[in-house]
Image: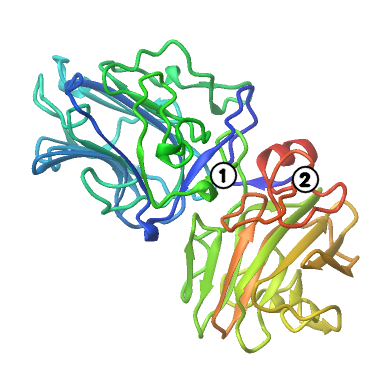
Amino acid sequence: MPTILGANSVSGYDISNSLAFNDASSETLDKNFSSDGDRQKFTWSAWIKRSALAADMVPFGAAEGSGRDEIRLNSNDKFQVFLGDASDANLITTRVFRDVSAWYHFVVAVDTTQGTAANRIKVYVNGVQESAFDTETYPDQNYQMDFTADCEHNIGAEGGGASLAFDGYMSEVNFVDGTQLTPSSFGETNDNNVWVPKLISGISYGTNGFFLQFKQTGTSANAAGIGADTSGNNHHMTVTNLTAIDIVEDTPTNNFATMNSLIPSGSVAFSDSNLVASAGANAQRTVVGTIAVSSGKWYWETLWTEVGGNDASSVGIVGTDNMTPNGNIAGVTNSFAYLQDGRKQNSSAVASYGTRFENSHIVGTALNLDDGTITFYLNGSSQGEAYDNISTDITYYLAAGFYNNNSKLDFNFGNPRFAISSGNSDGLYGNFEYAPPAGYYAVCSKRLAQFG
């Protein structure tokens, strides 16, 4: 069976899009409200899939004057809510949120009119209220927040600016002005006991509330609708440095593979929602995807934007049983790779194979774990079946390797962060430059549920 680390099960309600943020590009959505809402009550709900870790980043912030209110993931990878620069209220969870393969559902529900201090801010993760906090300071009763006030509110950065930029994916972002709701307004537990999104209805969003679905509907004034508010309030967001390519299919109801930034160490940097890997001159590293497979037929692409000079870059698979992050994929037992110089390699055995790949070339990989074969494609042309002796008793990472070279590549498991000129799906899901072979599928949770 496939291993889907933290991936959500298929639910009855489908979310079509999410918005991918790259912190290096200062990508934000913002809205400056013209009047106050209810400054004592709100609910914020968002589905989030993390990419970068160990850094302060703010999914939602507001700032009026010198003070700031923030909902953030802090440098310790804990979830934090603070009001008034943390001087008036500050909650920091005890547990951490470091799973870059999973979609989390965060809900922050506030009502400062409550007589019991602990009821004034409630934090929920995947439908369950958080009860353990490292820091637990609640606001005074009837406290007036910056959230919902007539000031700038930011999605993807701190209020009033582009600092502490978020890196990862967001989907179904709700901001409800004037009501302290529970998670059941936004999600439910499915038959597999997994918390999943549900169709949202019956919510009154109040004066300054909004609902962002990232469907690219709305007016041309807000970048083809990337920041369109679908709550009915028409609080469309101003878009900064986000374009249509940042609208992606990776969602809480169809979780696509990305690269696992927790596994490699040293000389490899990840960006663009963990779908771009850059290796330094001294890198000897294997990078792997967040979804491992042991059955089924799978297709993915890698765009080599910079190929190192020693012919040692590689694309392929590596067994999860003995893979370590140190060393190139081509030198690892239970590995099957297509090398930059056109050769192929199974563990330490090298043989002639296909055409050398260069900068701007796209390598496609078709992995058949029903029959134990792997075939590589170069710019859509098959290089022939590379191996037919892959053990079907082992689970494999989808991988790429670097060896003492400066290299950079973009991964596409059907959810690209680079421009696709032609556009091909696996019949239902994904977006590829070249058509997947018949019967091969994008690496996503819906296809794993069907064919894995």
- Mark 1, other Cα within 10 Å: few <14 / some 14–19 / many ≥20: many
The residue most toward the front is 220
Of 429 and 422, the residue lying toward us: 422
Q: Position of residue 25 (x, y in %)?
A: 39, 58
Q: Residue 144 carries which label?
A: none
Colour style of the rendered protein structure: rainbow
Residue 143 falls in image quadrant: top left
| Apparent side of residue 365 relative to residue 370 in the rendered image (left or right) | left
User: Which residue is drawn at the image coordinates 74% and 46% (left, top)?
Assistant: 425
Mark count: 2
The type of residue carrying mark 2 is Asp
Q: Can residue 92 be spotted in the picture?
A: no
Q: Position of residue 326 (x, y in %)?
A: 56, 75
| Apparent side of residue 8 relative to residue 436 in the rendered image (left or right) | left
Of 34 and 66, the residue lying toward us: 34
Give the SS element for disc 1.
strand
CB under 8 Å between discs 2 and 1: no
Of 168 and 191, the residue lying toward us: 168
The type of residue carrying mark 1 is Val
Residue 43 falls in image quadrant: top left
Up-down relation of residue 198 to residue 436 (above or below): above
Of 50 and 308, the residue lying toward us: 308
User: Which residue is drawn at the image coordinates 56% and 28% (left, top)?
Assistant: 194
